[in-house]
């Protein structure tokens, strides 16, 4: 009651008669809050963007089955598909190759079940995410390969061109029968990825009837532990049944590092904001030292004086913070696209190298 | 009304210890107009500050209306300042952003009374000190004499037991000073107890009793009866 009295008759006067100072205080705090909010928002959005790009490589696969370096018999695929709780299980052949175009360039070749794979990864050769002039020809011919549009443009490759790549099984010649738009896996590694049909890949890389990996998604309600146990029972010994590497360690380590640096920037903004609030209060206390003295002399208690300043600061801070949140949203919107895109590109290049560490890679 | 018993006040200034008051005993009766005189540094203001609870004695006792001011908590002292003492300062000490009426009503605002109830009282007091035309003026729009009248009105709003005035005309010209003295004298005639610090013997003569301090000790104590200047 008393504080309200003082707020109404003293603080309001200050606000009315010293508008410039009030505006300065409010905008100072507002900027501090805006910096904090926008950095946090950008931080969050960029992390989301990270996770998304990882999901694009592993797709919705909740579990990956791998064998030895030379792969494992493809009959295992049917066994896994028969395990209760499995939604989809798709085969993957994964190999690293050197593109022998102009300069040497490494790329990852994924052999996938072209007709099934979209159930796990976010793309399909049958819709807008790829340009394939003749899908039937692509499936029928064993030398068919899909390149990303980005890589094709960089290397000056057009549809129907032949390319030579060096693989662990020697130099192979493929024919580009389609281009992938930058969606799903084609976004990773700056586009250094090529896709083939799994059976063609088996032939090309000397892995007849063998596959490198099975990516598995679950029916809703199934847990990883339960599924891991069931699949282990269905398969012989010696198979590694794990979460997709990108989902666990990979994401945590890389995102952790990035998150730390973003948190540091967020802390900096927090300190700036706190300092601005502290500064605002201390300036007004110093300026109003005489006023405090007068109030104390005519019978204001220490509590009343402190309460007055606290209440003033609270009101100013609340108003300024609300404005700051709004401003932060605006800041974040204009910055987030740039930051997220940059970091995604940066991150994704690194991620591919670490997701698939295989012996042939230089 | 106000009683000091063997009051001493010492404080340190750098390495030196200053005896501002030495063993002062004084009894001020209800309705008195006491002038405290003495050269600068003699302890006049210190004495007044002890009476008003702005300061506490190093030793000895101070009572106002039989309530002790020595050795009590800061919050209690604050309440005594607000409710039982009206202060008038040399430099007016008005809040520059508040109107005359708000400045006068401030002690009651501190009690949590809404301004709507405080305002009529404040306006009445401003009329009493001759400022009925200045109710909504801020200090910067008032002359020195008018500011001090506002301060007098503020000192009166809580119906205090005593008004303490510390060189109330030290910042005013002689004509305006006389107006303030007459205002205080008028209040005293209506029964208001007043203690005023001054170094001007002509000013002191408005009082009914003059106490002189020298080096922190009582040197003289003269009652003037009903004399006027």
Image (tube, rainbow, N blue to C red):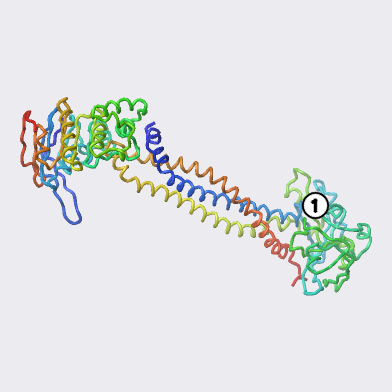
Q: Quadrant of residue A350?
A: bottom right
The percent position of residue B211, horizontal first and vertical second, equals 9, 38
Is residue A143 toward the left or the right of residue B55 in the image?
Answer: right
The subunit letter for the residue under badge 1 reads A
The residue depicted at 37 percent of the width and 26 percent of the height is B116
Q: Nearer the viewer, residue A207 or A238?
A: A207
Q: Quadrant of residue B35?
A: top left
Is residue B155 toward the left or the right of residue A1 in the image?
Answer: left
Q: Nearer the viewer, residue A153 or B71?
A: A153
The residue depicted at 67 percent of the width and 60 percent of the height is A342
Is residue A326 toward the left or the right of residue B53 in the image?
Answer: right
Q: Nearer the viewer, residue B153 or B223?
A: B153
Q: Nearer the viewer, residue A46 or B202?
A: B202
Q: Secondary structure at mark 1?
A: loop
The percent position of residue A62, horizontal first and vertical second, equals 75, 52
Task: For label 1, count other residues whose C-alpha is less than 10 Å away and answer few (under 14), some (14-19) or many (20+).
Answer: many
The residue to which callout 1 is attached is: A120
Can the viewer see residue A124?
A: yes
The percent position of residue B4, horizontal first and vertical second, equals 13, 36
């Amino acid at each position: 009651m008393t504080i309200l009295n003082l707020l109404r008759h003293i603080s309001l006067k200050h606000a009315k008669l010293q508008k410039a100072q009030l505006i300065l205080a409010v905008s100072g705090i507002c900027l501090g809050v805006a910096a904090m909010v926008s950095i946090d928002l950008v931080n969050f959005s960029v992390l989301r963007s990270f996770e998304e790009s990882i999901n694009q490589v592993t797709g919705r696969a909740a579990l990956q089955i791998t064998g030895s370096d030379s792969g494992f018999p493809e009959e295992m695929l049917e066994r896994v598909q028969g395990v209760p709780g499995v939604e989809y299980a798709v085969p993957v052949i994964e190999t690293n190759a050197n593109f022998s175009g102009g300069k040497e360039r490494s790329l990852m070749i994924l052999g996938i079940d072209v007709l099934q794979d979209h159930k796990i990864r976010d793309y399909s050769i049958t819709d807008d995410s790829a340009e394939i002039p003749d899908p039937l020809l692509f499936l029928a011919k064993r030398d068919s390969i899909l390149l990303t549009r980005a890589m094709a443009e960089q290397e000056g490759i057009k549809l129907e061109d032949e390319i030579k790549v060096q693989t662990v099984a020697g130099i192979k010649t493929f024919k580009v029968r389609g281009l992938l738009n930058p969606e799903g896996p084609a976004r990773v590694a700056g586009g250094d990825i090529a896709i083939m049909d799994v059976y063609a890949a088996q032939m090309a890389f000397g892995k007849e009837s063998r596959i490198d990996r099975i990516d598995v998604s679950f029916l809703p309600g199934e847990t990883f532990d339960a599924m891991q146990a069931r699949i282990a029972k269905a398969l012989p010994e010696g198979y590694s049944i794990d979460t997709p590497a990108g989902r666990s360690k990979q994401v945590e380590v890389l995102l952790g590092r990035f998150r730390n640096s973003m948190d540091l920037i967020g802390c900096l903004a927090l300190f700036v904001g706190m300092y601005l609030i502290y500064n605002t209060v201390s300036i007004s206390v110093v300026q109003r030292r005489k006023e405090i003295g007068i109030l104390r002399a005519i019978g204001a208690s220490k509590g009343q004086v402190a309460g007055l300043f606290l209440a003033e600061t609270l009101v100013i801070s609340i108003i300024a913070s609300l404005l700051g949140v709004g401003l932060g949203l605006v800041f974040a919107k204009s910055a987030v696209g740039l930051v997220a895109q940059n970091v995604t590109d940066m991150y994704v290049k690194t991620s591919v190298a670490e997701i698939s560490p295989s012996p042939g890679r230089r | 009304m106000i009683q000091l018993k063997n009051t001493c006040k010492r404080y340190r200034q750098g390495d030196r210890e200053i005896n501002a008051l030495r063993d002062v005993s004084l009894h001020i009766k209800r309705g008195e107009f006491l002038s405290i005189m003495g050269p600068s540094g003699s302890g006049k203001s210190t004495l007044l500050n002890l009476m008003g609870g702005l300061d506490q004695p190093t030793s000895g006792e101070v009572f106002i209306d039989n309530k002790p001011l020595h050795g009590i908590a800061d919050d209690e002292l604050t309440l005594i300042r607000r409710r039982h003492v009206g202060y008038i300062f040399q430099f007016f000490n008005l809040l520059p952003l508040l109107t005359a009426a708000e400045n006068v009503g401030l002690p009651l605002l501190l009690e949590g009374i809404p301004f709507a109830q405080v305002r009529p009282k404040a306006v009445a007091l401003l009329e009493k000190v001759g400022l009925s035309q200045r109710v909504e003026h801020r200090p910067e729009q008032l002359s020195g004499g008018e500011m001090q009248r506002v301060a007098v009105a503020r000192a009166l709003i809580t119906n205090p037991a005593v008004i303490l005035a510390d060189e109330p005309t030290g910042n005013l010209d002689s004509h305006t000073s006389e107006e303030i003295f007459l205002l205080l004298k008028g209040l005293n005639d209506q029964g208001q107890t007043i203690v005023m610090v001054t170094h001007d013997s002509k000013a002191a003569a408005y009082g009914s009793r003059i106490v002189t301090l020298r080096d922190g000790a009582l040197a003289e104590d003269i009652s003037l009866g009903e004399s006027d200047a």
